[in-house]
Image (cartoon, helix red, strand yellow):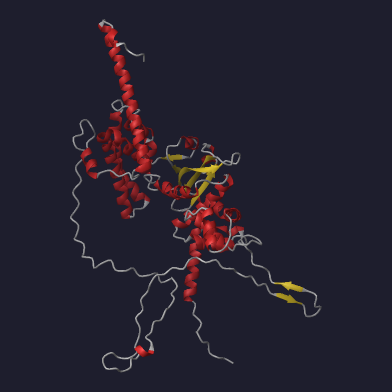
Amino acid sequence: MKTIDLDNLPAEVDVLQDLVRTLAEALHLKDTEIAALKHRLALFCRHEFGSRAERVDPAQLALAFLGMEGGPEAGPPEPPPAPAAPEPKKKGHGRRRLPPELPRERAEHTLPPEAQVCAKCGGGLKWIGEEVSEQLDYRPACLFIRQHARAKYACTGCQESVVLAPMPQQPIEKGLPGPGLLAHVIVSKFEDHLPLHRQERIFQRYGLAIPRSTQGHWSGFCADLVEPVVKEMVREILQSAVIHTDDTTVRVLDEAYKKTTRTGRLWAYLGDAEHPYTVFDYTPTREKKWPKAFLGDWRGFLQADAYAGYDATFTLDGMVEVACWAHARRKFIHAQGTDAARAALPLAYIKRLYQVEREARERGLDPDALRALRQDRSRPETEKLRAWLLAQVGVVLPKSPLGEAIGYTLDQWTALTRYLDDGRLDIDNNAAEQAMRRIAVGRKNWLFLGSDGGGRRAALFYSLIETCKHHGVEPFAYLRDVLERVSTHPARDIAALLPPNWKKEQEALRRQNAAAPSAPANPPDTS
């Protein structure tokens, strides 16, 4: 807009009125733009410097239902909780019992002979027992050399034939590392987030030079070995009725320009309760073809965020979209910075939906009972929320943070409320988001992937380690055993190496060993 000459304003009233209207519209646009920029700045500052916890004061949510003019009825107030019984007085935290499976090293402490005299009468002291106390100690991890001594046999007849005992199959044929060292390198990077250059320095402290490039080659060999196991996990996931998915960015070294990086993607796919596996998939871009390529002919409930790349998948017959209430809630959380009073009401309704889910978990309801509870308790709350959202359309500016939150929720309404009709579905996609935390912590340490091939290898190892975590399997013990066995394991029985099946096998072996009679320390002489 041109600069107004305040010394030569028009004298006509109608012209002045038009000028005022133009100025008012321009001012309104600037105010809207300033509010949006302030909102983005507040989000940036919170992301960089503030807490990311999406907590809301419960008192503020309670006040949101009071005095709602023209809004939906809040319903009768919930009865106050019954007073809890007084907790018994604690006797002190004490010291936790040390794990019985840890090895014990005994150190005996005795009195010297000259001190074994009674201080009162001067008589000699006699040993009558001992007091044992336990102290937790630490010995740094150690590297050791395993020697494979292969017996040689010669023919006693012709004295020409020589037979050598076969060498056991190794993860890397004629390679230097054993399965334990390979598992350690993998777990250290993808579970403990130690980049290979840090591990290189750690090995140097032990007096051994293992360059990061060598460790990278080892990881590549191991990825080829475990790939059939991960493919079997993918087949299991694609038998699920419900799949959760999410994606996150990773920096990848550009193969054409080695000093620059580009953005790749790691996708997580989680099976349902009948197929409890987590698989990661690496793609060089975020194009919509990648989820479609991974899922293939699978059809069922796909729970994800509102990324437009899934739209091509949801158009397929038999594919049902399930949205995430945590994403909708997050948008109202962000809108509090510009319109806290109105943003509190939808947050209060969403909190009631999560209270129903919490109660269902505490009661351990099956899918049918959960669906009935949602229809009885959650369905009315969603209807009230939708009525309030519709009432705000045309009142709240659509480009404001609150307007965008309202628009997002209404656009996703069918997918957001689909969980009410099926007890197998979750209210949100937090399970997939939690699986992504491992990637988020890891990329702050290793910073970038070396190539697209390195991304695919990382996806394989993350798949195994995350699934091990879900089933309570120690990843080092699992990978060490699998790397030692997988090259000779029958392909038709590859499912036996899946983490939950491997855990059952190990538990059966432990029970078998515990039930076996132990040999006497000094067997009788039968000669």
What residue is drawn where x is 30% and y is 12%? 19
Residue in front for this viewpoint, 142 or 374: 142
The residue lying toward the viewer, choosing from 201 and 365, is 201
In the displayed orientation, state which residue is furthest to the right.
158
Q: Is residue 147 above or below residue 214?
A: below
Q: Is residue 234 left or right of residue 168?
A: left
- Name the spot of residue 73 as percent of width and height, x first: 22, 36
Outermost residue to the top: 12
Q: Is residue 496 visible?
A: no
x, y percent for residue 392: 29, 29
Quadrant of the image for the N terminus? top left
Task: Determine the residue located farthest toward the front in the rendered image.
Answer: 114
Foreground of the two, 160 or 345: 160
Kindly indicate the quadrant of the structure image that contains residue 13: top left
Q: Total label count?
A: 0
Residue 37 at x, y percent in the picture: 35, 30
Q: Is residue 349 above or below residue 178?
A: above
Q: Which residue is drawn at the image coordinates 38% and 70% (left, top)?
A: 98
